[in-house]
Amino acid sequence: MSRHPTETKTRILHSARGLFSNHGFTATSLDDILGATGITKGAFYHYFRSKDHLCEVMLEEVVAEYKTLLMTIDKQAPAIEQLKQWLSILMEKNASGQWVNCRLISRLSVQIQQLGPDLQTRLTDFWRWYEGLYINWFTQSGLNSAQAALSARTLIGVIFGTIWLDKCAPSTLSMPDVVDYLLGLVLRTE
């Protein structure tokens, strides 16, 4: 029985997402992707022009998944509660083992200088959008625009760094505790 064409494309995207998130874009070869999916080069090239094109399509899907998650936030809640909901959702997704998007974005970001220009642009666009979310929540929480931008970049950077540090030297500190501590520092009034 032959497979439906979109099923093969989905399988390629799913396998490559796992490979890229675990090993990185540059360390994953086309042969690794073919081996993981059990397809031929011809089948791969039927759906994607190159490994870069595959990653571009994958990034489009990942950004769409982030935006879909964002729609689950209670828009009636205060901004800082929306941010906490967002972070809780991401932490829960990451803990499930089924969501590799944060790890994928992190891996690609670390390798950004080794990626092609289109991938660099897509990744940069993601980070601008993502940072904008945090800036918006901090601004709505009463911080001026400079404080909001600094707070957003600091929080994202600490979370990003904590994820990588835990890979090298796992900690007993939980990510929610780290986030709560940082939010307390950022939002304390003077």
Image (spheres, rainbow, N blue to C red):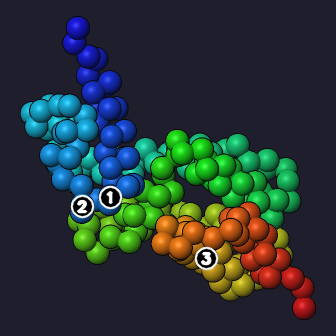
Q: Amino acid at mark 3?
A: Val
What distance separates the C-alpha of mark 1 from that of mark 3?
A: 22 Å
Residue 161 shows in this picture: yes
Nearer-the-camera pick, 16 or 188: 16
Q: Residue at x 75, y 54 (%)?
A: 85
On the picture, is 13 further left or further right than 41?
right
In the figure, is residue 159 to the left or right of 114?
A: right
Query: Pointer 1 and pointer 2: residues touching (CB < 8 Å)?
Result: yes
Which of labels 1 and 3 is toward the front? Answer: 1
The quarter of the image holding the C terminus is bottom right
Judge whether 107 appears above or below 30 on screen. Answer: below
The quarter of the picture where residue 41 lies is top left
Which residue position holds label 3?
158
Secondary structure of the residue carrying tag 3 is helix
Residue 178 quadrant:
bottom right
Q: Position of residue 187 (x, y in %)?
A: 83, 79
Residue placed at 76% from the left, 68% from the top? 177
Q: Residue 23 has which mark?
A: 1
Q: Which residue is mark 2?
A: 27
Q: Residue at x 26, y 66 (%)?
A: 115
Q: Earlier in the sequence, mark 1 or mark 3?
A: 1
Label 2, residues with CA under 10 Å away: few <14, some 14-19, many ≥20: few
Mark 1 residue type: His
Which secondary structure lies at badge 1?
helix
Mark number displayed over residue 70: none
User: Measured from the top left, where is residue 74 in percent x and y?
Assistant: 79, 47
**165 or 189, nearer to the observer:** 165
Residue ID at (61%, 76%): 158
Q: Residues within 10 Å of mark 3 (few under 14, many from 20)?
A: some
